[in-house]
Amino acid sequence: VPVVALVGRPNVGKSTIFNRLIGERVSIVEDHPGVTRDRIYATGRWIGKEYRLIDTGGIDMSNEPLMNQVRYQADLAMDEADVIVMVTSVREGVTLEDEEVAQRLHRTNKPVVLAINKADNPEQRQMIYDFYTLGLGDPIPISGSHGTGIGDLLDKIVELFPSDSSDTDDDDSIKFSFIGRPNVGKSSLVNAILKEERVIVSNIEGTTREAVDTKFKTADGKEYTMIDTAGIRKKGKVWENTEKYSVMRALSAIERSDIVCMVLDAETGIIEQDKRVAGYAYEAGKGIIIIVNKWDAVDKSNNKFDEFTKEIRKEFQYLRFAPILFVSAKTGQRLNKLPELINMIHENRARRVQSSILNNVVMDAVAMNPTPTDKGRRLKIYYMTQVAINPPTFVVFVNDVELMHFSYERFLENQLRESFYFEGTPVHIITRARS
Ligand code: GDP
């Protein structure tokens, strides 16, 4: 999916444009405690083409001088995006900051679109010609507040999407990534895995983006693609340690992965930021492994293993299904277990259950634990059928959707897990009324 970045000095209306571009369809989903959507990153669609939009202004670099902020944002966009949209405003004319951003963008070979915001009336639309001096081609007049010009802008953006995408998504290697907050040891894990698994098939360079995924083979001939994440090679960039940036990178990696390795730091324990990142992977329906890294650095005298396991289960209740692996990127301890675990989850995610067997399990479940009632009416389950894999998704047909309680759905999920072995993957159950 192509990535589009918005850059420009503060107050030109980038976040309004952001919302216009994605049609204000960014949902703030809060199914799980600690999970929020970040508004700097969203998926949009125009004439049937999907793209990811990022607002570089949403990454807080406010303790830097203004000129540096606009520089960093331009650099960030040049690193991350396939198409860059420079936004400025007709009100102030061409400013010094605009010139600085434009000058930086001249150095990239990525396509740049120049959008002039706040062109609300014909008079103001006349003034956009001043912006030719930026040397970024035809300025496109838009109005974030009125919504005019947005369609033209989108047409132009879509036209500039890279045609060939030598993305990794079309081979059948198992794709996985390490996600987690800065300094938990993601880069160290990547390097340690590469040392362990010596048969590197290829380094897959994104055509335009800076991403470098690594494909490797294990002794049994299985192929894996390790998805590049979290500023792994961006060490030293100003924005690397901002939370929004790492969330943004994590989201992008999660989308491209089959299985996500959520990395925790044994030394520091679990903090709030860890929980946020895990929630995204869960919502996306990806396979999940919880990795406790830096296990070498822990004093294991007093039951540390059990303690940590207990804490993880308590803090990540919605990840009950995820296996936990205690490793050390430093010593390589237990890292050889990772490919088998990934494999196992990959298989579980792709499992299809025959309807007849599935319905036997459901009937047994109902016999064991009667369905809930409300105001004298009892939930009736007619049948269940599997409608998708990756993750396994089931539709259960009932007399009245309102009668299905969350706790009963959870019970059914547990029965499915016990019978069909879905370790490491979310299982989705959708309740539908049968007419
Ligand atoms: P990232 O930001 O998540 O990519 O984290 P890094 O891989 O850069 O690691 C952050 C710090 O933790 C570095 O100083 C590493 O040397 C250290 N580190 C990473 N893995 C381990 C480990 O298994 N054991 C110990 N003791 N330190 C580690």
Image (cartoon, helix red, strand yellow):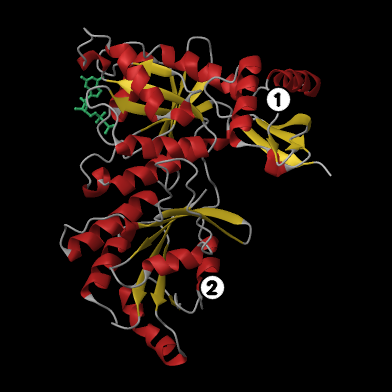
Mark 2 or mark 1: whose residue is earlier in sequence: 2
Task: Quickly name the residue at label 1.
Answer: 370
Give x and y (percent) for residue 405: 63, 36
Residue that lies at the very extreme toward the front in this rendered image: 376
Question: At x 20% / y 16%, what residue is drawn?
Answer: 297
Q: Nearer the viewer, residue 98 or 350?
A: 350
Density class for disc 1 (Cα within 10 Å; few <14, some 14-19, many ≥20) is: few
Left or right, 240 with respect to 383, comes to left
410 in relation to 332, above or below: below
- At 55% across and 71% down in the image, what residue appears? 151
Do we see residue 219 in this rendering?
yes
Q: Quadrant of residue 379?
A: top right
- Classify mark 2: helix, strand or loop: helix
Compared with 25, 313 (above or below) is: above
Mark 2 → mark 1, Cα distance in angstroms: 58 Å
Kindly report which numbered mark, 2 or 1, lies closer to the viewer in this rendering: 1
